Amino acid sequence: MSVSQQVFLRDAMRRLNLTRDVFAVRIGVKRRALDTWLLPEGSQEARNMPEVVSRFVTEIVENEALLEKYAQSAQSGPLRDRISYNGKHQLLSVDQFTRESVEELFRIADQMQPIARRQKVSRVLEGAVLGNLFFEASTRTRVSFGAAFCRLGGSVCDTTGFTFSSMAKGESIYDTSRVMSGYVDALVIRHPERGSVAEFADATNIPVINGGDGAGEHPSQALLDLYTILTEFSRLGKLLDGAHIAMVGDLKYGRTVHSLIKLLALYRDLKFTLVAPKGLEMPDYILEQAGKRGHVIEQTSSLEQGLVGADVVYATRVQKERFADEQLEGYTADFQVNKAIVDRCGRSDAIIMHPLPRDSREGAHDLGVDLNHDPRLAIFRQADNGIPVRMAIFAVLLGVEGLVQHSLRDVTWSPPSHIGPDDSVFHGID
Ligand code: NCD
């Protein structure tokens, strides 16, 4: 402790706004003991407080400060204004978030869980229409955004690929975006060029969500990844501050890891181990941004080394579709996260994640299917979290998050208790 015990305790009582009596009760000690800790150093009756008390008091004070911050932010207007992009209710990058605003979004995602788990229904977005514009391959992002919108009572119009859109006739991003805005109330866009979704966003005032812009960002994926990490950690009794995160695979073109490392960097004292084959390392501009907050960032091409001590192992697919003329010489079977290596080098309480899809073809060296029965494999729980998190994003951007709680009704059908035959017992849907 850098300040004296007396100053520390006085300061804590002041910040918590508690009298000596009430403070003693709050920290579970006798008033007499507290009195002896508060005596000036050197006086005969002065005693040192136990280390555990000092840690407990620090924790209470820090918690209180956090709550205060939440209260302040709640007063400073709706979340959608605080995370806005160029003054608009749009989601282009994880850079729009602070730790407080991201956690506020997750409290809304928690409220969505009964709907995502098919216990309740809500119609807060009844009448609203979502336009899903996907100019690149997608299964889960497109469908889960659509399903999330529908589960809030809205409906969805889709267009997929360039071939079936007027962009194949030479239409500009500006024209496409402006025209679509006349038809729908929100747009989710995926496009192969970095920065292109921001161009769509500039051409409209309706909410636009970046569903992946080339090798740029994938903010909604990073949000559901962080939500998954926090949920899994709370089950395992771990805190994210101080955790060790390993990211494995194509860190150069993988937009999910670009967004995720920046979002994780909002937390404290993290250690990142980045395991990539030569030529597919994390870009410098991302490393610089994440490194600014004093986290430890190690880079290696040894998966074994990367797995040791990691609380989270985040594997990724090699984004071959983004390769110009790169050769994949260094990407050998040694990069595969599979049961043997996880059992040999990983922690018994690690969680293994992947944004999916994983390339399960022979010779792909992507995340192994032999982990499917291992409860450490969190990939399907992670994908399932796409629904509550994307519902929260829509509710916030369209300003209806305050209406959800009172809009809930029971479902009329009965879903199975576990949606996947291999789901871990702790991942039932009710
Ligand atoms: C990712 C993507 O499209 O960036 N998939 C996803 O959205 N869950 C990852 C990938 O394609 O490898």
Image (cartoon, helix red, strand yellow):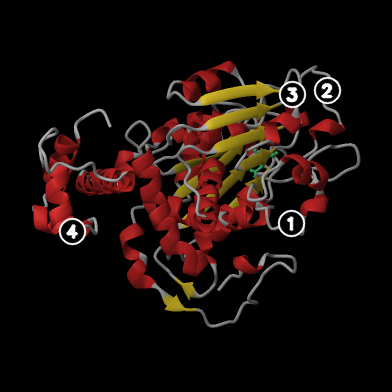
Mark 1 or 2: in front is 1
Measured Cα–Cα span from mark 3 to mark 4: 55 Å
Residue that label 1 marks: 374
> Callout 4: 10 Å neighbours few (<14), some, many (20+)?
few
Pointers 2 and 4 in contact (CB under 8 A)? Answer: no
Q: SS at mark 4?
A: loop
> Callout 3: 10 Å neighbours few (<14), some, many (20+)?
many
Pointers 2 and 3 in contact (CB under 8 A)? Answer: no
Disc assigned to residue 301: 3
Residue that label 4 marks: 30
Quarter of image, res 8:
top left
Vertical arrangement, residue 376 with respect to residue 173, above or below: below
Q: Dividing the image into 4 quarters, which one contains the C terminus?
A: bottom right
Q: Dividing the image into 4 quarters, which one contains the N terminus?
A: top left
Q: Residue at x 45, y 46 (%)?
A: 182
Q: Earlier in the sequence, mark 2 or mark 4?
A: 4
Measured Cα–Cα span from mark 2 to mark 4: 66 Å
For badge 3, the amino acid type reads Ser
Numbered-mark total? 4
> Callout 2: 10 Å neighbours few (<14), some, many (20+)?
some
Mark 3 or 4: in front is 4
For badge 1, the amino acid type reads Asp
Nearest the eye: 259 or 186? 259
Q: Residue at x 63, y 38 (%)?
A: 309
Q: Is residue 43 left or right of residue 357?
A: left
Q: Earlier in the sequence, mark 1 or mark 2?
A: 2
Measured Cα–Cα span from mark 1 to mark 4: 48 Å
Q: Earlier in the sequence, mark 1 or mark 4?
A: 4
For badge 2, the amino acid type reads Leu
Does any portion of residue 274 appear in the rendered image? Answer: yes
Q: Is residue 34 left or right of residue 174?
A: left
